[in-house]
Amino acid sequence: MTDYLSSQQDIYTEPSDIDVNTLNNLGPLRFMAGVWKGEKGLDINPKADGPLIQEYVDWIELQPIDPQTNGPQLLYGLRYHQHIIKPGEIETYHDQVGYWLWEPATETVIQTLAIPRGQVAMAAGKASAEARQFELIAQRGEMTFGICSNPFLDTAFQTEKWTIKISIIDMMHWSYEQETSLLIRGSKTPFLHVDKSTLHKISEPTPNPLARNQTV
């Protein structure tokens, strides 16, 4: 529940005079807009004979979308696609799509994600508009900001908790570190699956459609 919802009587009326320039209203996410590449990612994932440490190369494109409203709730965001391969290879190692969202009224950052192995999640965390570091969390079983998996994954590699920490280094670099707590069938101890990478900007973002229309 958002901080203001308990006192909000009108759940239908949208805000008036919305600034349609998303890039000017992304809070801490403004540093992440654009196209990025990471060349020395590190993945620690579970295998039958123990943890496997794998390097990877990733591309992340984050493009601004038009402002979104749910009645009085206002969200600004970035649509993203992350594509990962192993060094020197072509085959997809990991692929992920979703949205990074900023709710100015509650200073909340939200990430939605979907991967083509039958899993979706939504994570959230608090951050000021000027924050250079912030953390988002999703937990299995929660009705908001939770995790949903297909039956095989939920039985064999059950995701209990997922955390992502973002650090803005400068205007051309940012990093992430993800920790996924997995309860693997046959094991009594959760496995901590780690992914981390530092990215550098390779191109600037394209303004959202409404903002582009203002310049015509």
Image: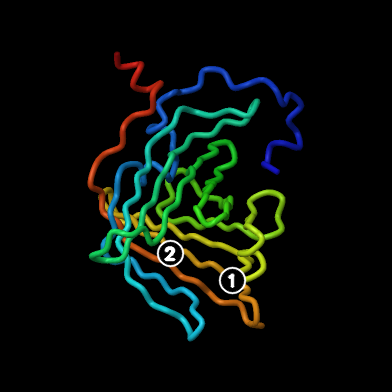
Type of amino acid at the residue the image marks with label 1: Leu
The residue positioned farthest toward the top in the image shown: 216
Asked if residue 75 is positioned above or below residue 53 in the image, the reply reads above
Q: Nearer the viewer, residue 206 or 135?
A: 206
Residue 135 location (% of width, % of height): 51, 58
Q: CA distance from mark 1 to mark 2?
A: 16 Å
Residue depicted at x 52% and y 46% = 109
Residue linked to disc 2: 177
Q: Nearer the viewer, residue 63 or 9?
A: 63
Quarter of the rendering occupied by the N terminus: top right
Asked if residue 139 is positioned above or below residue 66 in the image, the reply reads below
Q: In the rendered structure, which disc, 1 or 2, sits on the residue that comes first in sequence?
A: 2
Asked if residue 202 is positioned above or below residue 162 in the image, the reply reads above
Q: Nearer the viewer, residue 90 or 20?
A: 90
Q: Nearer the viewer, residue 166 or 159?
A: 159
Q: Is residue 114 left or right of residue 35?
A: right
Q: Are marks 1 and 2 in contact (CB under 8 Å)?
A: no
Quarter of the rendering occupied by the C terminus: top left
Secondary element type, mark 2: strand
Quadrant of the image occupied by residue 90: bottom left
Residue 88 location (% of width, % of height): 23, 65
Residue linked to disc 1: 182
Residue depicted at x 36% and y 58% = 92
